[in-house]
Amino acid sequence: MYYEILAVLFALSGFFMKFSDDAYDVSNNKQYAAIIGIFCAITSAIATVINVGAAYIFIGILIGNLIAFKVDGVHHVITLVLFIIFVIIGGIPSLSIAVLLICILSALTDEIGHEWVPKKISNKYVNLFFEYRFTMKVVIFLLAIFGAFSIWVFVCFLLFEIAYEFAGICYEKIH
């Protein structure tokens, strides 16, 4: 039952993250983006508090996006602040700095690669790799294989990614 709950939290977090971004970026609806961002903060913070693998992933994404200057809207700031508050209240699992740095660097690589690679490289496979942010997927898989956390955390992360893409499709259809 534990990993089923974690899977739902990851999927909801991915869905809310993309839906909030699209509400802000596509429709310029700051209020709606902020409300959906609150749900993203809640789901990702709960996952972070209850599972060390989720903590590595969500904190890695957060810090990677901060470093890449991708926290670029009021919805991001509200989500960030609430996430931090919820995680401080709930408590962060004990983390390895090395594993956290690996997650941060993979998230940062994905964010920079997503923006930069299509402008500079014409190889369609390399572009697809960064369009769908595969660096972190590969890194999370390897960390699970080498025992940093359960392989089920990798499966949950894939659900996050699938839900993220699904939210983009849903948003496109209704707006």
Image (cartoon, rainbow, N blue to C red):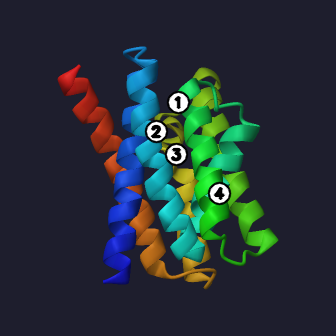
**Which sits earlier in the primary sequence, circle 1 or circle 2?**
2
Q: Which residue is mark 4?
A: 59
Q: CA distance from mark 1 to mark 2?
A: 6 Å
Query: Which of labels 1 and 3 is toward the front?
Result: 1
Q: Which mark is residue 37?
A: 2
Could you tell me residue 50's position as x and y percent? 52, 75
Task: Check disc 1 and report its element: helix, strand or loop.
Answer: helix
Q: Is residue 121 visible?
A: no
Q: Amino acid at mark 2?
A: Gly
Quadrant where the image shows the N terminus: bottom left
Q: CA distance from mark 1 to mark 3?
A: 22 Å
**Which sits earlier in the primary sequence, circle 3 or circle 4?**
4
Q: Amino acid at mark 4?
A: Ile
Q: Which residue is mark 1?
A: 75
Query: Which of labels 1 and 4 is toward the front?
Result: 1
Say whether marks 1 and 2 touch (CB < 8 Å): yes
**Which sits earlier in the primary sequence, circle 1 or circle 4?**
4
Query: Which of labels 2 and 4 is toward the front?
Result: 2
Q: Amino acid at mark 3?
A: Arg
Q: CA distance from mark 2 to mark 4?
A: 16 Å
Task: Check disc 3 and report its element: helix, strand or loop.
Answer: loop
Q: CA distance from mark 1 to mark 4?
A: 17 Å
Q: Which residue is mark 3?
A: 133
Q: Is residue 168 left or right of residue 147?
A: left
Against 162, residue 78 (above or below) is above
